Amino acid sequence: MKVPAMIAAELRRLTASRMGVVALLALMCVPILYGGLYLWANQDPYGKFSEVPVALVVEDTGSGTADDPANYGEDVAENLIEGNAFDWQEMTAEQAAQALHDGDIDFSVTIPADFSEALTSASGTDPHQARIELETNDANNYLASSMGTQAVEKIRSSVAEMVGSEAAEKLLTGLSDVRDGMVTATDGATQLVDGSASAASGSSELADGTAQLADGTAQLATGARTLSDGAATLASGAQQVSDGNRQLADTADRAGSAVQQAADTLPQVRTDIQTLLTDQGLTAEQIDQVLARLDPLGQRLQDGNSNVQAAVDKVDQLAAGSASVAAGASTLADGASTLATGAGTAATGAAAANDGAARLRDGLSTLADGTVQLRDGLQGGVDRIPASTPELRTSQADTIADPVAVSSDKVASAEDYGAGLAPFFAALAAWIGIYALFLIVKPISRRAVTALHSPIRVTLAGWLTPAALGALQMVGLMGVLSITLGFRFDNLIGTLGVLMLASATFAAIILALNVWLGSVGQFLGLVLMVLQLVTAGGTFPWQTLPAPLAALHHVLPLGYVVDAMRQLMYGGNLARAGWDLAVLAIWLVAALLLAMVGVTRMTHRRTLRDLQPSLIG
């Protein structure tokens, strides 16, 4: 019996009765039902989040002043409702707690009363974080709780961005005001530079003038001391002259008094002489002659007395004048001494003034240098703070609040959640479909084993029947995925080829298990499916598996089917797909060789156990 005849015989056996046909058709639909229904149910769950009921409790009392109120809680609630990410239902805290307990909502989000106050507390003396309260109930749905955690994190990020943007805009506005102030300060510093330069120039001239003043007052002090010394000497000499003139005047006064007395007694002496001559008996003529001779002498005495008195007056005047001179010289000496003292004081003050003017000049020069540095520093600060506009500040604030934008570029892309799971569940459906077929398909015909001694033909016939049926299963499954569910395939024919090769490989593996172990092998096929279910990396990355399971990922074939489908379905790396197909081919050949060895054993070593019916099939 040839291989095609053995295949036809097995198909006739399977379709010999109406119930056999129904059973075959039902088992043929197993991968379509499993893969199609599961992927249909999970094709786009994220698109249905807007129908997930979630309670939103807003208790925020706001913050700010009556003129500038702020209620971030209401703003957040409004944004959430408008965003329509979930079916947000505004409730009180009591209503939300009851609804969560009863399962009417999947989770609740509460914005507490101090939400706005906490968000604005950073500018006060008691900064603290704002809270968003999440209440979940895993008894309702564990994944809903995970979604709630992610939703609250997005709310937190959104609020942080909003508050950060407002804070950054205030900061930038303040910085702009600082820049304007610095511009004004720079203008003032420029004026200060000009003024300090003028002051420095004037102080230099003042220092030169005070230096000249110091020199002049020093010379004046020296001259005043010389004058004082000369005036003192003059006063001493004048006093001596005055004393001598006074003595001369006294002597002259006494001489004048004597001459005056002599002049005053002259008439009496003339009368006495006339009387004496008369008594002597001289005649009048004789007396006249005598008197005539005496009268000129008396006249000269009178003239001399007049001269003496005039001289005495002049001597008195000289004494008085010399006394005045002495007094004046004394006053001059006192004034000269005072002048010398004052000139010395003036010289000391002028020297001090010169020192102060020099220090003022140096200080104003330093001030001028400092004002230049101040102006340059202010100008440098102005240059480093860019000029801005309200629009620019708003853009800058938004950038500061959210500085990183994620640019996503996919080398290969799945269009939705269902498409992302399709390779895994399609590959798993291929295994389940083949496993189900072996519930009614006989792995090896005992008649063929008894009649033929060709293990190769017996093995090929036992494998090709489920492999052909499995290929039909995969064509139906691909029709459901591509037409009914509308999944996009970058390489439709290649993806179908991977599934058909996978189905053929799985048929060879389960065939080998059945040949060697019988019903136990069929059970091990179920165990092997479970192992591949957790090690294929169809949902989470295989790197997240425990080490023993991660090792099995590199051995068992289902993971390679999933990877090959991903490369061909999403437009990935064809070289990787080629390697995956090579591994599947190795499994296929190895399983067929193992089955052939088992069939060979059966043809040469038959026992009573081989003639007993199998527990399955």
Image: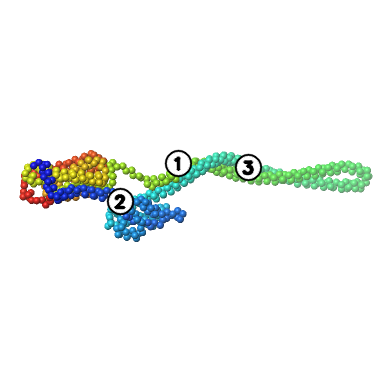
Q: Is residue 5 visible?
A: yes
x%, y% of residue 607? Answer: 6, 48
Which residue position is annotated with label 2? 48
Q: How many marks?
A: 3
* Farthest front residue in view: 18
Q: x and y percent of residue 408 in the render?
A: 32, 43
- Mark linked to residue 374: none
Residue depth check, mark 2 versus mark 3: number of the one nearer the observer = 2
Residue 383 has which mark? 1
* Residue 65 in the image: above or below residue 382: below
Secondary structure at numbered mark 1:
helix
Pointer 1 and pointer 3: residues touching (CB < 8 Å)?
no
Decide which of 393, 301 is in the foreground and name it. 393
For the residues carrying marks 1 and 2, which lies nearer the camera in this image?
2
Q: Quadrant of residue 74?
A: bottom left
As measured in the structure, the alpha-carbon distance from the residue carrying label 2 to the one carrying label 3 is: 114 Å
Determine whether label 1 and label 2 are within 8 Å by CB: no
Q: Quadrant of residue 380?
A: top left
- Disc 2 marks a residue whose amino acid type is Lys
Q: Earlier in the sequence, mark 1 or mark 2?
A: 2
Q: Amino acid at mark 3?
A: Ala
Report crowding for label 2: few under 14, some 14 to 19, many 20 or more residues within 10 A (C-alpha): few
Image position, residue 168 (x, y; %):
41, 48
Query: Residue shown at 90%/46% (left/top)?
Result: 274
Relative depth, front residue between 84 and 519: 84
* Local secondary structure at mark 3: helix
- Quadrant (top left/top right/bottom left/bottom right) for the N terminus: top left
Residue carrying label 3: 224
Separation (CA) of disc 1 from disc 2: 54 Å
* N-term mark: 2 or 3: 2
- State yes or no: discs 2 and 3 in contact (Cβ < 8 Å): no
